[in-house]
């Protein structure tokens, strides 16, 4: 296994025995662990996913209109500090902002920062805030808040919604859309690719024609048509499920092809023939031999499909064909960034983009690491 | 006969995920021009790795030993293979002065290019012939190796030829650059026994005509007995016995060689039982200390075998064996 | 069926259709096995020898009903049941599978890498529902593993822990766990090192005697067959060319192909100059063979009749049969 420094023969033997009795899952995990970037990616992924799930707790305000800060529109990020001219404090604080408009500012509303000692607003932890429901139970504690007013560590958008809260809920939404889409795609792929690969012959030819047809459907025109088809009366949740469904219905083709290829080669393996020579039924062969043989590959494919789903949804929502307010996703958050005003003055609108780049990269690293670790039997010696 | 190849202390380690594996450990042998030397061993013996080392063809995680020296004596002076590093330098050796043929002929011909095109390409790389001359030479070589209708075959693809013919075509391609040394890595293992006999005869013939040296790698002692002039028996990366083929096979001295011969089913002795060598070949990650064969040796002497690596002792003029039994006799204890 | 014949093949042919050929003409076929007749006695170790293209693997599979029998009859009679393989009901086929098994060639490909050794060996018992409880299955697995010289701790491990020879023993254990009567060993030692080969062969011989099995041992290696089989059949290009008790075949080969095969085996004696002929030429094309004897393209003794008529098996005496027009003249 890994580099073992001098150990006693008994410990050595135990390690060897562990290697001999290691199942495929254990072997894959061993190999995966050795890949530093994959492991780092996995940690980042776990952190992001947990942040998304626990976003109501982690974020101080509701991400929708209900939580907006009327006094701080298009506000810059407020980074807490510990020390300033008036001295240091153990508790981090931010400043009060006052909106003024005067001749000096050309009559534009401007937020001025007041840095006096009495203008400090201290950050509180586990503070009481807006109520939210999590797993059916109502909570009102948030990880952090501020004693007066609101705190926006990523700034706010044009209506005053806290960008940090929106970012975390966006991560959650995108992951949810991705999950549903991937699951739908996966079941379809398993069914079609599986039947195709297991039976081969004419069934395979027909199913491959179907697969190719679906593959060649151009996505953007399809979505435009669907966007036109979706009635406005649908709630955002219904819309959300609909988009996920459509993404899944289009996304199964690559996975199906991979499953089919894998099955076509696996079913000619000698150990499959050995089982068939005992009179094994197709379901036994599939269950005992074929499915386990490509489980690792399928998991890799699933993980790698996620970023595609997420990016597809982002792109669609960005051009207005996907999700809409108040359902929050990265695409929705980016809907308003194309104006010159934003690009020149409110660059913090792009902070969520960094989150998503990190999320996608994490998926990619983990997927690559899994793929490299996935076949522990690839280099069996002869 | 001039000394063609000198291998001294070839040591090769591989840096793998599972740790550092010693594939070849202190192998030394030499080859004259016109001599066929057999390199015999089972799986894990390191024979293929040794052969590839002669052309520095091993994977990039291969680490050669400090004292490894391989020198090839060509017409214009000796070449130190270990010192060659750039592709340009190695080009002299690979395909030019040294050629290699492999076990699986289907694998060494590109499936989408005709055989003729590949042979011509080889010639154009290593010689200064024109394309037309290269074609002539190639067709001549195909004919020389016994492929009938050579000019038609020249334009065919590898899959259109049978196994035996493909192997002959590979030999033709390897010899078309007139190499001084031919490395044959299990060339007949994948062939039917009747075709194998033909190919062995062909190779012996070609040595007579071309005068090159051949390093013939195989696990089949019978093939070595019929083909080679000298033989080196390898086990887990070391040479345990070497010498002229008549002597090593007629008077096997190392317990491993003896075991191998006893385990072979012989047609001339149908009554004798098949005696396997007890135990299994250890994995290269667990090479035994001392003599690598000591874990399975029926004539195990004791702590000396498991602690000290035996040196070569001569049984006769050219016949050397690395075994403590003979070392003791030598020292007169 | 005479005496104690366990399984017999009578005029068995296995043809595979291939694509191509004219639209309205006869469909081209590959005659993998053509008109083979042989009988395997109960308890014998029957060798089937041939080179590539001889059809020996196909014949072996046909006798296990793992390859389609185009024409001819394969009959299996172990005293308890009497099956004709070409027309068996699915119930009979299920039963036949418990009585006839196959050991594969490649020890690395024949074992599922994701199952423990215990599961691999137990699988036939589970599929064929031969045991009624997990304890019974475990007991039988342990018994057969012990016979194949596998330790108890080996049962918990996965195939990647084992060497080629050990894997082959696991393969053997799997084939034998259902206590079949007839076992086909298809090149079962070809992929093994010489020192391990002898070990596995000895094991097969031992088990055969212990369990009273009948083996069909398919191999291209005549020396191995000579040591372990009591009866040998030689195939060439899908046809049976010679069959005899082992000693008889090796001491007195009558077919030119058998003679050539024997002389082609490289002897360990460097000075043994093979007196018999070396074969020139190649085997004929499988889709378009010449009429008459299929060996004519390489036979040094081919005459007109050889090019016209296919020779049938004739008795030389002593259970020794040969299919050659000229066997009496050629010594």
Image (cartoon, rainbow, N blue to C red):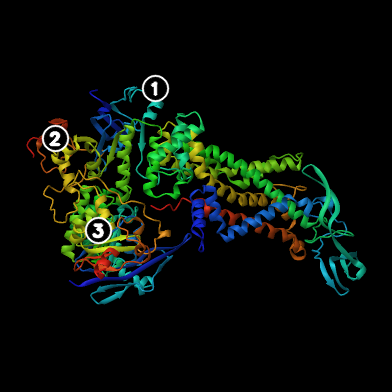
First in sequence: mark 1 vs mark 2: 1
Q: Residue furthest bottom?
A: B77
Q: On the image, numbered disc 1 is attached to which residue?
A: C89
Q: Nearer the viewer, residue A221 or B196?
A: B196
Q: Which of C166 and B64 is in front in this view?
A: C166
Measured Cα–Cα span from mark 2 to mark 3: 35 Å
* Marks 1 and 2 close (CB-CB < 8 Å): no
Q: Which chain carries label 2?
A: C
Which residue is pictured at 77% across the width and 57% down the height?
A: A164
Q: Which residue lies furthest to the left in this view?
A: C329
> What percent of the width, then of the height, locates residue C59?
29, 34
Q: On the image, numbered disc 3 is attached to which residue?
A: B171
Q: What element carries label 1?
A: loop
Q: What element carries label 2?
A: loop
Measured Cα–Cα span from mark 1 to mark 2: 39 Å
Which residue is pictured at 36% across the width and 40% down the height?
A: C104
* Marks 2 and 3 close (CB-CB < 8 Å): no
Measured Cα–Cα span from mark 3 to mark 1: 54 Å
Q: Which chain carries label 3?
A: B
Q: Which of C15 and B34 is in front in this view?
A: B34
């Amino acid at each position: 296994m890994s580099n073992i420094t001098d150990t006693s023969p008994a410990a050595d033997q135990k390690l060897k025995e562990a290697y001999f009795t290691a199942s495929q899952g254990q072997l894959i995990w061993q190999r995966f662990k050795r890949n530093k970037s994959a492991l780092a990616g996995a940690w980042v992924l776990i952190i992001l996913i947990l942040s998304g799930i626990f976003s109501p707790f982690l974020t101080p305000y509701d991400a929708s209109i209900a939580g907006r800060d009327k006094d701080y529109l298009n506000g810059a990020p407020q980074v807490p500090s510990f020390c300033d001219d008036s001295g240091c404090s153990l508790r981090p604080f931010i400043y009060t902002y006052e909106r003024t408009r005067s001749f000096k500012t050309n009559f534009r509303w401007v937020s001025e920062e007041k840095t006096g000692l009495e203008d400090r607003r201290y950050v509180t932890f586990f503070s009481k805030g807006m109520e939210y429901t999590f797993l059916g139970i109502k909570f009102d504690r948030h990880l952090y808040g501020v004693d007066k007013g609101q705190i926006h560590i990523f700034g706010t958008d044009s209506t005053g919604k806290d960008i940090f809260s929106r970012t975390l809920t966006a991560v959650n939404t995108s992951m949810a859309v991705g999950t549903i889409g991937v699951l739908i795609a996966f079941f379809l792929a398993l069914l079609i690719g599986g039947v195709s690969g297991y039976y081969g012959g004419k069934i395979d030819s027909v199913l491959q024609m179907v697969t190719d047809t679906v593959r060649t459907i151009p996505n953007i025109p399809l979505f435009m048509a669907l966007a036109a088809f979706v009635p406005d009366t649908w709630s955002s949740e219904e819309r959300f499920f609909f988009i996920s469904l459509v993404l899944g219905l289009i996304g199964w083709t690559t996975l199906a092809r991979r499953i089919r290829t894998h099955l076509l080669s696996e079913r000619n393996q000698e150990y499959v023939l050995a089982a068939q020579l005992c009179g094994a039924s197709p379901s036994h062969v599939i269950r005992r031999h074929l499915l386990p043989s490509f489980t690792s590959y399928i998991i890799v494919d699933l993980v790698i499909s996620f970023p595609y789903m997420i990016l597809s949804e982002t792109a669609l929502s960005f051009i207005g064909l996907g999700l809409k307010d108040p359902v929050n996703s990265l695409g929705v958050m980016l809907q308003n960034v194309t104006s010159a005003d934003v690009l020149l003055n409110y660059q913090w609108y792009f902070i969520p983009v960094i989150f998503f780049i990190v999320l996608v990269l994490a998926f990619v690293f983990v997927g690559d690491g899994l793929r490299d670790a996935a076949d522990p039997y690839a280099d069996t010696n002869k | 006969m001039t000394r063609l190849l000198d291998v001294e202390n070839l040591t090769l380690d591989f840096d793998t995920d599972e740790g550092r594996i010693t594939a070849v450990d202190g192998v030394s042998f030499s080859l004259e021009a016109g001599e066929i030397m057999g390199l015999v061993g089972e799986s894990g013996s390191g024979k293929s790795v040794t052969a590839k080392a002669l052309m520095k063809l091993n994977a990039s995680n291969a680490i050669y030993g400090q004292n490894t020296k391989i020198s090839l004596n060509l017409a214009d002076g000796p070449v130190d293979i270990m010192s060659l590093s750039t592709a340009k330098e190695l080009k002299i050796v690979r395909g030019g002065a040294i050629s290699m043929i492999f076990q699986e002929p289907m694998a060494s011909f590109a499936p989408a290019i005709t055989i003729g095109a590949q042979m011509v390409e080889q010639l154009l790389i290593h010689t200064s012939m024109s394309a037309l001359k290269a074609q002539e030479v190639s067709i001549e070589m195909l004919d020389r190796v016994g492929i009938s209708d050579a000019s038609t075959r020249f334009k065919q693809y590898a899959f259109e030829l049978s196994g035996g013919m493909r192997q002959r075509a590979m030999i033709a391609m390897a010899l078309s650059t007139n190499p001084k040394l031919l490395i044959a890595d299990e060339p007949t293992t994948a062939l039917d026994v009747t075709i194998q006999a033909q190919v062995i005869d062909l190779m012996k013939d070609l040595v007579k005509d071309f005068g090159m040296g051949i390093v013939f790698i195989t696990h089949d002692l019978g093939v070595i007995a019929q083909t080679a002039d000298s033989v080196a028996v390898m086990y887990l990366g070391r040479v345990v016995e070497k010498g002229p083929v008549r002597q090593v096979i007629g008077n096997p001295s190392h317990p491993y060689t003896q075991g191998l011969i006893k385990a072979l089913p012989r047609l001339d002795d149908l009554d004798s039982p098949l005696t396997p060598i007890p135990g299994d070949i250890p994995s290269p990650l667990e090479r035994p200390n001392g003599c690598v064969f000591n874990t399975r040796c029926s004539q195990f002497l004791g702590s000396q075998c498991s602690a000290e690596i035996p040196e070569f002792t001569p049984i006769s003029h050219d016949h050397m064996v690395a075994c403590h039994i003979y070392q003791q006799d030598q020292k007169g204890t | 069926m005479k005496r104690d014949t366990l399984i017999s093949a009578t005029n068995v042919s296995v043809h595979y259709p291939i694509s191509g050929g004219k639209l309205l003409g006869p469909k081209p076929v590959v005659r993998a096995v053509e008109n083979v007749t042989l009988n395997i006695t109960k308890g014998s170790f029957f060798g089937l020898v041939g080179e590539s293209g001889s059809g020996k693997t196909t014949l072996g599979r046909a006798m296990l009903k793992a390859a389609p029998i185009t024409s001819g009859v394969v009959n299996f009679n172990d005293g308890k049941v009497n099956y004709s393989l070409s027309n068996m009901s699915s119930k009979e086929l299920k039963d036949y599978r418990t009585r006839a098994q196959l050991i594969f060639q490649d020890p690395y490909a024949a074992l599922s890498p994701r199952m423990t050794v215990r599961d691999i060996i137990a699988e036939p018992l589970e599929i064929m529902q031969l045991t009624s409880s997990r304890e019974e299955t475990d007991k039988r697995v342990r018994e057969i593993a012990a016979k194949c010289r596998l330790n108890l701790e080996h049962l918990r491990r996965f195939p990647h822990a084992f060497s080629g020879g050990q894997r082959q023993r696991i393969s053997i254990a799997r084939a034998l766990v259902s206590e079949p009567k007839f076992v086909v060993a298809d090149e079962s030692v070809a992929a093994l090192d010489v020192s391990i080969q002898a070990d596995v062969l000895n094991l097969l011989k031992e088990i055969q005697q212990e369990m009273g099995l009948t083996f069909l041992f398919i191999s291209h290696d005549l020396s191995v067959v000579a040591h372990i089989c009591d009866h040998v059949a030689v195939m060439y290009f899908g046809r049976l060319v010679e069959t005899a008790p082992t000693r008889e075949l090796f001491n007195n080969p009558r077919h030119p192909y058998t003679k050539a095969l024997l002389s082609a085996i490289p002897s360990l004696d460097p000075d043994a100059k093979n007196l018999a002929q070396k074969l020139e030429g190649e085997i004929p094309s499988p889709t378009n063979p010449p009429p008459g004897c299929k060996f004519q393209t390489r036979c040094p003794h081919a005459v007109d009749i050889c090019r016209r008529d296919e020779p049938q098996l004739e008795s030389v005496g002593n259970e020794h049969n040969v299919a050659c027009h000229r066997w009496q003249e050629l010594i």
